[in-house]
Amino acid sequence: MNRKRKKAVLLTGIILFLILLFLVEKQEKRQETASMANAFLKEDEGQQEASSERSETADATPENPSGEKENREEKKKGVSSGQKGKIALTFDDGPSPRYTPILLDGLAERNVKATFFVTGENAEKYPDIVRRESEEGHLVGNHTYHHVQLTDTNQEQFREEITMTNEKIREITGKEVNFIRPPYGSWDKRYETELNMFPVLWDVDPLDWCTENVDAVVKNIVTKTKENDIILLHDMYPSSVTAALQAVDILKEQGYEFVTVEEILFD
Ligand SMILES: [Zn+2]
């Protein structure tokens, strides 16, 4: 073999080796991509499963564990509103100039009555909304003037907060106020006789104020609510308003009737 030929053989060898190296690497990469895609698909499947679980349980209640399916069956049987009993939606801290009107539209569309525990401060700022609440058949209650919690040291101030708010609401709606939701549930029985005010606490607290997750709030409401329950919500957040209306649709379909707290407590 002469020198030239040797060189050519060596060169061909190197080229072949490089081609081989390139092919091996390509194959490895393809496998890697395939396994990545597989992992991604699996993850996606998992999410889909989780979300279908969510939508299944969204319609389920203790009495109705299978959710939607049973609803449809009940519909066939002809469930009339009120067959499952009365329940009351309550909305605290408002009115909100942005979200309360949307809620009122939604409640009117569904012919549902609710109770609004407004602060005197917000009633003063948005009297038209408070008037609308009252005119559309909702009950307007007291939530103190400045959202004050009753403590051992502020009893006189608390009494003033109540009377100031009662006067404000009466001035706007022309109606006497006899129901109060004491902020944070702190209450002293002596105000009941002294001020003729009846405290309204709650049975179902879906913690709507601390999440923007509408599905979670709806699920919380529909799974926990039973006959004669009072449900605590806040008309200050868009997610609460959306969740409230979705829960109304589900609970109405299950046969519940929505009334004001007055009807729950005194009927
Ligand atoms: Zn409050």
Image (spheres, grey):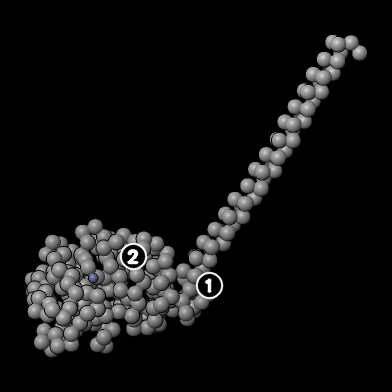
Element under disc 2: helix
Q: Residue at x 10, y 69 (%)?
A: 172
Q: Quadrant of the C terminus?
A: bottom left
Instruction: Say which mark, if any, is on residue 69.
Output: 1
Residue 104 percent across, percent down from the top left: 26, 65
| Disc 2/disc 1 C-alpha distance (Å) | 31 Å
Q: Residue at x 67, y 39 (%)?
A: 29
Element under disc 1: helix
- Is 150 located above or below residue 210 in the figure? below
Nearest the eye: 264 or 62: 62
Judged from the image, the quadrant occupied by ligand 1 is bottom left
Look at label 2 and name its amino acid: Cys
Nearest the eye: 72 or 234: 234
Q: Residue at x 22, y 79 (%)?
A: 186
Q: Residue at x 74, y 35 (%)?
A: 24
Dot 2 and dot 1 residues touching (CB under 8 Å) = no
On screen, residue 107 versus residue 152, left or right, reads: right
Look at label 1 and name its amino acid: Lys
N-terminal of the pair, mark 2 or mark 1, is 1
Disc 2: which residue: 210
Q: Residue furthest front?
A: 3
Number of labelled discs? 2
